[in-house]
Image: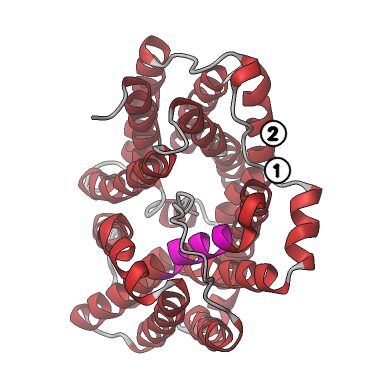
Amino acid sequence: MVDKKLGVVLFTVFLDLLGFGIVIPILPLYAEHLHATDHEIGILLAIYSVMQLFCAPLWGRLSDHVGRRPVLLVSIAGSCLSQLGYAMAPSFIWLIVARGIAGMCGANISAAQAYIADVTTERDRASGMGLLGAALGLGFVFGPALGGLLGRGQSTLPFVVAAALAATNFVLALAFLIEPRPEGQRTKARALSWAGLRLSLSAPKLWTAILLFFVVTFGFSNLEATFSLYLDRRFGYDRRQVAWLFTYIGFFIIVVQGGIVRRLVPRFGEKQLVVAGTAMQAAGFVGMWHARSLPVLLVVIALISIGNALTTPSLSALISRLAGDAQGSVLGVSQSAGALARITGPLVGTSLLALGLGAPYLLGAAVLLAASLLAAAVVHQPTNHTPVCPEPIEPG
């Protein structure tokens, strides 16, 4: 039975990611409608993670002092504002501003994680974090599906609906979300720190795992940034069809991350799943370069999605176990490495479109193949069998 406080914050996160999922597949095409170049679309998508990189530690620390509830309420209100900004944007510059506000407010996941740490015991915390990951995943699955249905109407309709969802989320959170603990009893929010950075850089096993996390996140964010444009230009797909294919990706990720990977880790270990997952993604990216029909496209997308769903939580768990007692500090470093990858991935991927529609995927295949070989040669499977719950994976 899910605790009432935990249930409320999980529903809040689900609604937040539902709005995010509605927008992300159609945003590149909407920006193109506003005469943005490919490189400008890369900047539009990267600015979200730039704001997350700087704001996530601030949100986390602010929630330590003023409470989780005020931070979550302010960020939900800001999310509503950003969605309205998309709908009303008269130019690409205004779209950039709205996207920046969305990234700043999307950094509230650190406050949500801290909220869950406050309302769960040490014994139940892994389960609570797993439920948070499921809420994130469900929002990202159902969001694009809803966006696909809305894509039949006016181009701004998905943004208006996402804004309405955020407004509803704010009202419900205002009514039902309560502060879990007083200031002196709160669990510290995890954030990037100099101590964590020094520890990560001084331990070869740790920084190798964090480097792999960066590369895998870079490859997938490269796909997220270019996928809508790729589908439009190679297959002639509209916003609705693009959104359904994003839902297809999300389906595989939530099925694998939600259950399959937890059963495979005890049998094969995190290292083997990282090696296999990165190799699957590399093969999928090569397939993206060649794909000319929908059946082939569906197969290669499945390869990439399943590979990513195997790799990302396995790397997160591996980093957690290698960090030992310094999990909080080191996970702050890995989260920041992921944010940097979600900044550089869209910028590089959209810039490479100038060299050809398949260029971003050839680069993705190369770096992911290198990651698979590096993981096989360098990464050591920890002998510590203490169960660790991976941090929820945030969409880029």
Nearer to me, 345 or 55: 55
Which SS class for mark 2?
A: helix
In the rendering, at what x and y percent does residue 317 appear?
Answer: 49, 60
Is residue 279 shown above or below 36? Answer: below
Task: Using the rendered view, name the quadrant where residue 230 is placed.
Answer: bottom left
Task: Residue at the far top: name it.
Answer: 175
Residue 312 located within the stretch drawn in magenta: yes
For label 1, the residue is 54
C-beta proximity under 8 Å, tags 1 and 2: yes
On the rendered structure, is 82 left or right of 229?
right
Which SS class for mark 1?
A: helix
Task: Using the rendered view, name the quadrant where residue 110 is placed.
Answer: top right
Tell me how far mark 1 sits from mark 2, CA to CA: 7 Å
Residue at point 45%, 69% (across, down): 223
Is residue 10 shown above or below 39? Answer: above
Residue 150 appears anywhere in the view: yes
In the rendering, at what x and y percent does residue 330 appear?
Answer: 66, 54
Is residue 272 shown above or below 158? Answer: below
* Number of the label disc, if any, that sits on residue 169: none
For label 2, the residue is 58
How many other residues sit within 10 Å of disc 1, few (<14), some (14-19) or many (≥20)? some
Residue at point 28%, 65% (across, down): 263
Q: Give the amino acid at mark 2.
A: Leu
Residue 39 appears anywhere in the view: no
Q: Give the amino acid at mark 1.
A: Phe
In the rendering, at what x and y percent does residue 234 appear?
Answer: 34, 77
Q: Which residues are magenta?
A: 311-321
Nearer to me, 356 or 182: 182
How many other residues sit within 10 Å of disc 2, few (<14), some (14-19) or many (≥20)? some
Residue at point 52%, 87% (across, down): 376
Nearer to me, 259 or 366: 259
Frontmost of labels 1 and 2 is 2
